[in-house]
Image: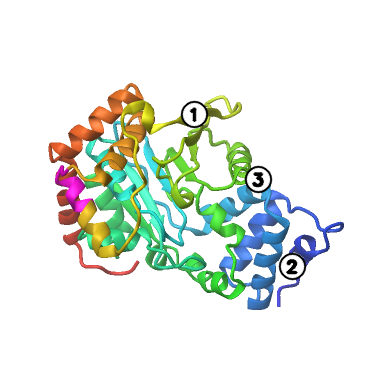
């Protein structure tokens, strides 16, 4: 048993009148001891549920990110026309709506805006479809070493940090999520974690407004101003079409978020969000969109692609971004990017790092 960890557990696990928030350093230490299993299983499970009940602070999230930076993987800086964008998406996947981020990532990469995604396999508590399975259905197997992912990123502008291969310490804590039956604060950190050593723009999905406040506080403490928050589909970065998209844009001077409220009806893209029915149908729909076919998902892909092309600097405004997204899809350029990605990944033998 770790006596040092027990002291941190006592701070967050006391009653509502006596519990205390951790300092940034204490949160980093607690995370380090959980990742390295210096804390016992009983201590780790107790801390996760107590911290969830207490609710993390922005300072604590900053400390957890410090530990991730110390112990986690980092893709190295690459030369690019536009800054690298990291998409923060819930690791426990999707169960109701079709994920669009693979299409968005291909569109951005086709426009010379590099993208890094990260995640693992099916994960509690939702056990929804994770990104790794969607990519596999498209013929892209991200079971590569980190050095190989680095090469793919440099060649194609796309990279994927895969927990089981690249961050085994974090993968070792996944079982606790199932055992406690709730998402721990680590699940919140994954939305704002950047596994990239260079300057990157972080896009963080969220559901509840207090989460966005925690994001902004953590970013401020870590000196990150290039970020955006998206009240997206199932907490992802995917912009909805059946309601107004609520977006917060980080400001270079660290001032309050610039708030965007975007309705697809204002851009003749009104419609319903595409439901998730099966993996087979999802892959077929994504492939149809990449082939330029006018199915319902095409409208969602244009809506999302247009916004992110604008946000990442490839287009001067949203209207231009929407037109560019449609052009990249109907001209076959996004499909060509997928083929390039498949070739780059297939050039390696899948070997764990």
Q: Is residue 84 magenta?
A: no
Q: Residues within 10 Å of mark 2 (few under 14, many from 20)?
A: few
Q: Marks 3 and 1, Cα distance to the nearest angstrom?
A: 22 Å
Tag shown at residue 4 = 2
Q: Marks 2 and 3, Cα distance to the nearest angstrom?
A: 22 Å
**Residue 131 vs residue 249: left or right?**
left
Q: Dividing the image into 4 quarters, which one contains the N terminus?
A: bottom right
Is 125 drawn above or below residue 320 in the view shown? below
Q: Residue at x 26, y 40 (%)?
A: 107
Among the 4 quarters of the image, the one containing residue 47: bottom right
Q: Position of residue 228 (x, y in %)?
A: 48, 36
Closer mark to the observer between disc 3 and disc 1: 1
Question: Which element carries disc 1, helix, strand or loop?
Answer: strand
Q: Which residue is mark 3?
A: 58
245, 180: nearer the viewer: 245
Q: Position of residue 328 (x, y in %)?
A: 19, 36
């Amino acid at each position: 048993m770790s006596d040092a960890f027990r002291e941190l557990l006592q701070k967050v696990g006391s009653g509502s009148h006596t519990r205390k928030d951790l300092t940034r350093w204490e949160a980093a230490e607690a995370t380090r001891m959980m990742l390295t299993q210096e804390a016992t299983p009983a201590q780790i499970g107790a801390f996760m549920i107590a911290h969830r009940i207490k609710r993390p602070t922005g300072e604590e999230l900053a400390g957890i990110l410090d530990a991730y930076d110390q112990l986690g993987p980092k893709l190295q800086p690459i030369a690019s026309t536009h800054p690298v964008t990291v998409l923060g998406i819930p690791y426990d996947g999707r169960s109701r709506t079709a994920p669009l981020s693979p299409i968005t990532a291909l569109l951005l990469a086709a426009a010379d805006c590099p993208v890094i995604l990260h995640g693992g396999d099916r994960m509690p508590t939702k056990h929804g479809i994770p990104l790794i399975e969607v990519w596999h259905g498209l013929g892209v197997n991200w079971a590569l070493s980190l050095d190989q992912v680095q090469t793919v990123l440099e060649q194609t502008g796309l990279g994927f940090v895969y927990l089981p291969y690249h961050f085994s310490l974090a993968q070792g804590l996944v079982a606790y999520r199932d055992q406690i039956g709730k998402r721990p604060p680590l699940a919140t950190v994954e939305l704002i974690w950047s596994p990239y050593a260079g300057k990157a723009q972080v896009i963080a999905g969220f559901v509840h407004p207090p989460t966005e406040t925690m994001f902004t506080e953590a970013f401020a403490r870590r000196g990150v101003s290039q970020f955006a928050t998206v009240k997206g589909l199932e907490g992802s970065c995917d912009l909805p079409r059946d309601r107004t998209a609520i977006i917060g844009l980080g400001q270079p001077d660290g001032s309050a978020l610039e708030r965007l409220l975007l309705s697809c009806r204002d851009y003749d893209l009104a419609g319903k969000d595409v439901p998730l029915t099966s993996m087979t149908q999802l892959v077929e729909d994504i492939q149809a969109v990449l082939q330029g076919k006018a199915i319902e998902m095409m409208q969602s892909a244009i809506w999302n692609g247009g916004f992110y092309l604008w946000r990442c600097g490839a287009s001067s405004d949203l209207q231009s971004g929407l037109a560019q997204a449609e052009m990249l899809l109907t001209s076959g350029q996004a499909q060509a990017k997928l083929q390039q990605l498949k070739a780059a990944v297939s050039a390696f033998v899948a070997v764990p790092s």
